[in-house]
Amino acid sequence: MARTGSTALNAPLGVAQRAAPRYRYQMQPLSKSEHAALERPDHDRMLAQVQIWAGINSGTGNLKGLGTTASLLADAFASLHGEVELVEPAPVEKVLADGSIVEVAHGRHLVTTVRPNAPVQLLLTGHMDTVFAVDHPFQEQRWLDEGVLNGPGVADMKGGIAVMLAALSAAETAPEFQNVGYQVMINSDEETGSASSAELIKQLANGKLAALTYEPSALPDGTLAGARAGSGNFSIIVTGRSAHAGRNPQEGRNALLAAADLALRLKALTRDGLSVNPAKIDGGSPNNVVPDHAVLRVNLRPHSPGLQDIAYNEIKRLVSIIEQEHEVSIHLHGHFNRPPKPLTPDAEKLFGLVKRCGEDLGLSIGWKSTGGVCDGNNIAACGVPVVDTMGVRGGSIHSSDEFLITESLVERARLSALTLLRIAQKGAI
């Protein structure tokens, strides 16, 4: 399938055509090594990779599909001539509908390490899993239009992984990049919160100057995600006492009613900068029995660390009140797995570098705050500046309408490669 061209991408490198910027920036001509490196990304090769990887179901719970995908990615990233390993997932617990807590299996995570003793160290991350389970009806790819590919994970984020690999391969051809070492992590559980890879992310972020993550752009026009809210998922197990609903209801303690009361009180915590979504209550009983069991599932999205602390303290306070008023016992399971990601001065500096690189390539790069979360939240919480939407342009992710704008494969690979080379030249952001 032919791809749609664009004025900026088809212009000779270094002769970028730019839209009117919102601030005055003197474009920096590309050096000889930059020019050579940015000629390297190949559209057809990258598209073929995306289609092969997206052709394998790698839903977070599909361990077989994830294993196949991990092997293919390990082979692909071996071309960087670093150390490639598949890391075992950390144990993860899950609360079932009956309130029992079980361990959930996850796929292994890919880690590639290149020049670990270099003076400048970077982290690049992505994920191999998708939201589409092995039995989901959305399994095939099709062309929606010239240069627009519809398929599971083509944007989120098989396309992003192809961009990452192409950018690193391009940067590796430039002499100045030999002063940079980096680690690549592609985990198997990002779509469900990275519970089995959170500690790995923390370890890999240690000592890194900056990080790039390859989620698709926040908007199809290439806008990046800036500040992000945090996210916490909780399963609240409520245990009451059964009784006959007609003969002796007063002796029962209604767990379902207690869970519903708690859901309403939690929802009332919603305010500017904090959203609360009670999502589901499992449990109940036959109509003639006072239910003695319920599990409330709730998600909270704080936009600042302070609001996260307030939210957690409020959850504990409300749990205590419900226990006393309804005479039930409650077990709180879960935590804030994605800390809020504010735009720190170092993060703004990194965004500024990406923007300037975009200007030099004829791309207008902007960013906006979002309530969505990703591994960029976890990286930022380690004190490492990160731009976490360096992947492809596309849209409708997490749905059967997901699409990839294929011309963005080379476009975004060049943007990443130039960003990496500018960091290499300065030894800083």
Image (tube, helix red, strand yellow):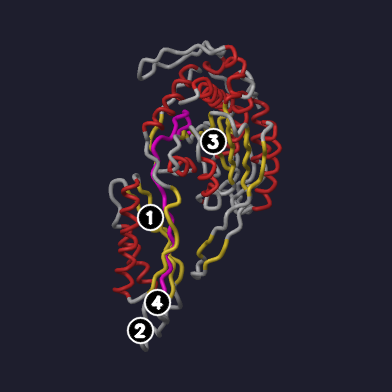
Which stretch appears magenta?
214-239
Answer whether residue 225 is magenta in the image: yes
Mark with earlier residue (1, 2): 2
User: What amino acid type should be assigned to the residue bearing mark 4?
Assistant: Gly
The image shows residue 210 at horizontal and vertical percentages of 48, 33
Mark identifier at residue 277? 1
Cα gap from disc 3 to disc 4, whole angstroms? 48 Å
Q: Which residue is mark 3?
A: 123
Disc 4 crowd rating (10 Å Cα; few below 14, some 14-19, many 20+) is: many
Cα gap from disc 4 to disc 1, whole angstroms? 24 Å
Q: Which residue is mark 4?
A: 240
Task: Tell me whether the residue at label 4 lies in contact with that at label 1, contact meaning CB atoms closer than 8 angstroms.
Answer: no
Which of discs 2 and 4 lies nearer the camera? The answer is 4
For residue 421, above or below residue 12: below
Q: Secondary structure at mark 1?
A: strand
Mark with earlier residue (4, 1): 4
Q: Secondary structure at mark 3?
A: strand
Task: Tell me whether the residue at label 1 lies in contact with that at label 3, contact meaning CB atoms closer than 8 angstroms.
Answer: no
Q: Quadrant of the C terminus?
A: top left
Mark identifier at residue 249? 2
Mark with earlier residue (3, 2): 3
Answer whether residue 141 is magenta in the image: no
